[in-house]
Image (cartoon, rainbow, N blue to C red):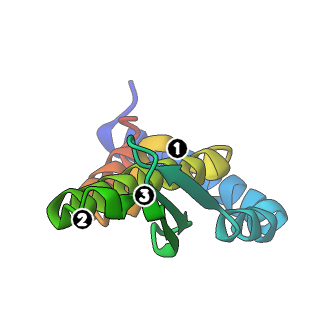
Amino acid sequence: MESFGERDSAGLQAYADELRATFMQLQDKGAELHTKAKSVQVTATSRDGLVTVTVGARGELVRLDIDPRIYRRPDARGLADAIAETIHRATAEARAQIIEIFEPLIPVEQMRAHLDGDLETVMNQLADQMSGKR
């Protein structure tokens, strides 16, 4: 019968092997994926068609276009809301593209946690992987 320590050792070895394989893939594909991810830009238009935004890979605003028809119905709050909502939609799409780009190397949930800055989830995922729970 296998002891608890042997199971831990086997789990750690399997995890180390997986990390090594992932590292090798990162070496082979990492630069290409990084370049591809950095070039992500998403353009979205507000539901009324008066606001168009372009965001970069991190959701940073690259371009904002406001249709001159906006002056026909001056509504500063409505305009601000349309801009914010359109940026949020474009940012969500950019994030989805980044996750898709890295999916061959990084599991989706792990990438989401990294992008969210959710250190607790990242650490829990790593602990689960090291203990063979995934």
Residue farthest toward the front in the current orientation of the protein = 72
Count of number-bearing discs: 3
SS class, disc 1: loop
Give the CA separation, mark 1 to mark 2.
36 Å
Q: Which residue is under mark 1?
A: 107
Q: What is the number of the mark on residue 69?
A: 3
* Residue 80 point in image, percent of width and height: 24, 65
Q: Is residue 37 left or right of residue 128?
A: right
The answer to whether mark 1 and mark 3 are in CB contact below 8 A is no
* Residue 92 point in image, percent of width and height: 42, 50
Crowdedness of circle 2 by 10 Å Cα count: few (<14), some, many (20+)? few
Identify whether 95 is placed above or below 56: above
**Quadrant in the rendering for residue 69:** bottom left
Viewer-closest of 29 and 39: 39
* Residue 39 point in image, percent of width and height: 70, 68
Amino acid type of the residue tagged 3 in the rendering: Arg
Which residue is depicted at the point 34% across and 46% down? 5
Amino acid type of the residue tagged 1 in the rendering: Pro
Q: Which residue is under mark 2?
A: 80
Q: Nearer the viewer, mark 3 or mark 2?
A: 3
SS class, disc 3: helix
